[in-house]
Image: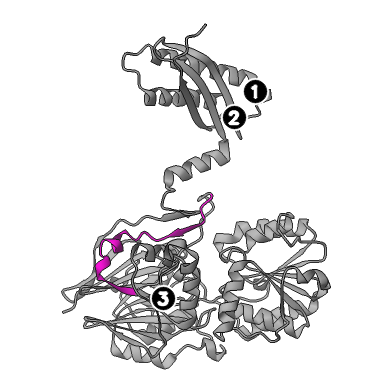
Amino acid sequence: MSEVKIVPLGGVRENGKSIYVTEVEEEIFVLDCGLKYPEDEQLGIDMVIPDFSYLIERKDKIAGVFLTHGHADAIGALPYFLEEIPVPVFGSELTIELAKIYVKDYPKTRDFNDFHIINEKTIIEFSKAEVSFFRTTHTVPDSMGIVVSSDEGNIVYTGDFTFDQSASPMYHTDFARLAEIGKQGVLALLSDSTNAESSALAASENKVFDDIYDTFRDWDGRIIVAGVASNLQRIQQIFDAAYKCDRVVVLTGKDVEKIVDTAIKLGKLTLPSDELIITEKQMKSKNKQDLIILETGRMGEPLHTLQKMASKRHRFIRIEEGDLVYITTSKTSAIETTLAKTEDMVYRAGGVVQTITDRLHVSGHANQNDLKLMLNLMKPKYFIPVQGEYYVLAKHAELANEVGIDYKNIFITDRGDILEFENGRLRMTGTTEVENVLIDGLGVGDVGNIVLRDRKILSEDGIFIVAITINRREKKIISPARITSRGFVYMKSSNNLMNESAVIVEEVVLLNLEKQDFDWGVLKQEIRDQLSRYLYDQTKRRPVILPVIMESSQKRK
């Protein structure tokens, strides 16, 4: 009997950051290695990646990383993983090329080159298991599901998927292969839950193209399209519609340029004309009604860049009277506030906003009927909903129960939960501590909750700096307390507050200088405590208080 473990290190009870560990005997298979974008309270953070501690402790057992598709939530954390654990990486041709963009852009993994291209026919044999793949439909070509086969049965991970019977051949799902996997016997299914609350039928991609084309054709002015750089299906539709309307396309941002160039070289994107794409400099010579500007934003987040365009802070493009901003991404609860703010700024700048979801329900993720179909094709003994917040995981669990899977065989996991197959049954046997790792610039994990708390306070109540010079030997204050404030109060109109604060600081300093066991840390903390109480009493605010205490041996004259 094989020892089998399943450990989600991310991608459960959260959106993005997919990474699922499957262990068979002494071999570990890492399924996806994604990131997620920061939430509003994570001030200044660029991205959030999984905690790799569990895998670092077991790095000698890792057979490789197996990728389902080329979106950031599946491949974005790969450079940081490979920095710690340089193991082989497996994925489809396009997925590998997109993964290389991330890996080569990170200085510490620039030389890594242990990539392996697979397809739906590939079977990789390891000592105790074999790994195979199946084609799925998503918004990027070459998307794959993964099968880890053991003596106990198949462990299947769907990755992001939907079912679209009218999808182009490049995006087809291999239904025969899905049925074959189900007949072989599925021990556990890890399935995409992102859209589990929706019973709405997503519009076919043919209808989506028609909407994009109609929008381009009917607008007599410049159009700025906001999308996601790695949604190649949507980018192809934008190219085709622009060509059909005799418009040219301007790509803004290095991310989209790299992705488009890579996809074109691999034949995953087709340019209807060699003259379709022009540069930002060339667009100055074009009439506005001939322009489509494709804005995908840094790392696939276009809304903040649209805000820069609306507030005239963008390097090249400013939203003006007569511009249409056409948003082709799906609305989610996570971006509702940002989207509303963006729309308001666009209208203030003179533009008009339309979203593709105004008329169509679009999604690259399976709805309830699709999820039930996947469950019926796989017929898993155990089911683990993944990819999404708790409420969609719970809804997916209900759907699984509706198709006949007993609740005792369904596991709604949290990050770090360890599921182990022992004595003929899969059960929760423990947990490993898993934290979010925050990326801020080149810093990996050096920003934690304390730093975020300070940033939040700084953004809300500002900073209050007090500087004073003392002579410990003479137990005197050489230079009286000087107060500086930023983002807290307007100093010129707060003289009484500043003067009283200086008095409090000097009293605390003199009391501490008289102590036999003088301690710098105690002195600074007492200044913070006393000032914090006083300032909150006077203003109901709690700024960050920064005491700067200097020592001088100079005698006071």
Name the amino acid type tagged 2.
Answer: Ser
Q: Which residue lies under the disc numbered 1?
A: 494
- What label sits on residue 67 in the rendered view? 3
Give the quadrant of residue 510: top left
Is 290 a magenta residue? no
Looking at the image, residue 180 sits to the left or right of residue 527; the answer is left
Image point (43%, 25%), residue name: 524
Q: Tell me where residue 120 appears, x and y as whole percent.
A: 41, 88
Residue type indicated by callout 3: Leu
Marks 3 and 2, the one that precedes in the sequence: 3
Q: How is the image coloured?
A: one colour
For this rendering, which residue is in front, 415 or 81? Answer: 81
Q: Circle 2 is placed at which residue position?
A: 485
Cα separation, mark 1 vs mark 2, equals: 11 Å
Q: Which residue is drawn at 31% across and 13% down?
A: 516
Task: Identify which residue is drawn at 63% across, 78% down.
Answer: 235
Q: Residues within 10 Å of mark 1 (few under 14, many from 20)?
A: few
Residue 161 in sight here: no
From the viewer's perspective, tell me whether residue 110 is left or right of residue 498: left
Give the class, few, some or many, for how many residues have Cα within 10 Å of label 3's Cα (few <14, many ≥20): many
The secondary element bearing badge 2 is classed as strand
Above or below, comparing residue 451 to residue 361 in the picture: above
User: Are the residues at dot 3 and dot 2 in contact (C-beta closer than 8 Å)?
Assistant: no
